[in-house]
Amino acid sequence: MNSSLMEEYTLKDSNGNRRTVSLCTNDRKDSNFSSSCLQIIVKIYLFLKGYFQSIRTSPLKNVLRRLFLPSGYPESVTDDYANFEKWDSLQGLCSYLRQVMVTRSTLSGLGVGNNFAHPTAAALMLLWREGFGVVGGLLFTWGKSSRFDKDSKSWRLFADVINNVALTMEWTAPLFPTPVFFALHSSANIFHSLCGIAGGATCTAFQAHFAKRNNIGDICSKHGNIGRAVSLVGLLLSTLCFWSSSLLENSLPFSFGVFCFLTVFHIYFNILALRSLHLAVLNKERGYIVAEHYICHKQLLDVSSVSKKERFWRPLLNSRIRVGCSLLDAPLLNSSFKNFLKVESL
């Protein structure tokens, strides 16, 4: 004869009143397993109930803080975090809107809407394009990966500029014959690969700079949430633009003007984002600024002043290490020795 066991759990209803729930198990052999399962179900129920009640009763501001800001903000991050995320979000929105325009242009070039287009040819073209991107990314990482940490601002700007070049190539590719279309798209995908590598590496360096409480993971996840929110806003804006205006579809000059407008602001917001970063680590460019100012004015610059003077392109254009000066410029050498050096150089 089977014996029955009674399990009792106390829950709270929506009014806060306690209610006892009794659950019966008929077999003593299965009582332990059933009890464990019921306990897990009850705990999940209580957790979900408390979570949704907290969302329902909390102000919108608190919900947004939990979604987009690191725990302990603003004490858990550096002072330049908010400004950087603001400008970075705006440049991301410009990039997303242009990506929508490029996607439409790419689909048109691949033959969407054309009865004579062959799907196999389009698939092979996309596969080869991805292959070129992979090879380009491997070669780029092999040659430049050691410089991403020390010149992170420069390589971040490089990533965004090369991404703009790639988007422009993809957007204009359908205007050309198929061989040129394929060459432009393959080259553009190589540039996209370079952008992904340099942008991802420098983003990690920036987030390590922001973290004050060993909270890099939290900062990375919230940065990702901000990017997703920007993508949603871009999705809504692009949908409204394509539905409300036929000029984007039918007028090439108008589309070109919108694309250039977004590109200019994309670069502008990127420069503002990089200017707002106050990296406290000396590289060659920042060390040169500090040393030059100290020699001329006999005082050390603070981090924010160095950031305002920093030039992002110089580490990319001139990577040679220079120590000292030419012997021809040395003030202590006599004129005869300088003339000898000039003759030898000839």
Image (cartoon, grey):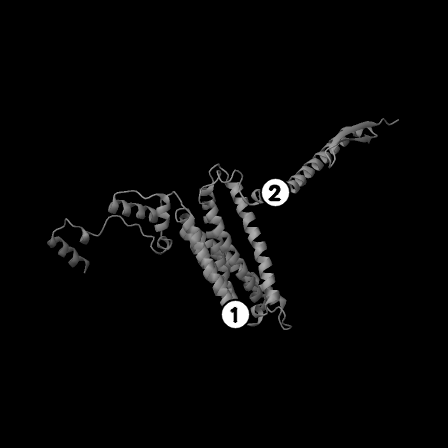
Cα separation, mark 1 vs mark 2, equals 43 Å
Residue 132 image point, x, y percent? 50, 60
Q: Amino acid at mark 2?
A: Pro
Q: Amino acid at mark 1?
A: Phe
Are there few (<14), some (14-19), or many (20+) residues within 10 Å of tag 1?
few
Q: Nearer the viewer, residue 158 or 258?
A: 258
Q: Nearer the viewer, residue 192 or 216?
A: 216
Q: Nearer the viewer, residue 151 or 42?
A: 42
Give the mark, 1 or 2, whose residue is nearer the N terminus: 2
Residue at 28%, 42% in the rendered image: 299
Can residue 45 be seen from the camera position used here? yes
Compared to residue 215, the image places residue 10 above or below, namely above
Residue at 13%, 57% in the rendered image: 339
Answer with left or right where residue 43 lies relative to residue 299. Answer: right
Query: Number of callouts in the render?
Result: 2
Answer with left or right where residue 325 lies relative to residue 74. Answer: left
Quarter of the image with the C terminus in it = bottom left
Where, by quadrant of the figure, is residue 115 drawn? bottom right
User: Which callout, 1 or 2, points to the residue nearer the camera?
Assistant: 2
Mark number for residue 59?
A: 2
Residue 177 image point, x, y percent? 52, 73
Quarter of the image with the N terminus in it = top right
Which SS class for mark 1?
A: helix
Q: On the image, numbered disc 1 is attached to which residue?
A: 254
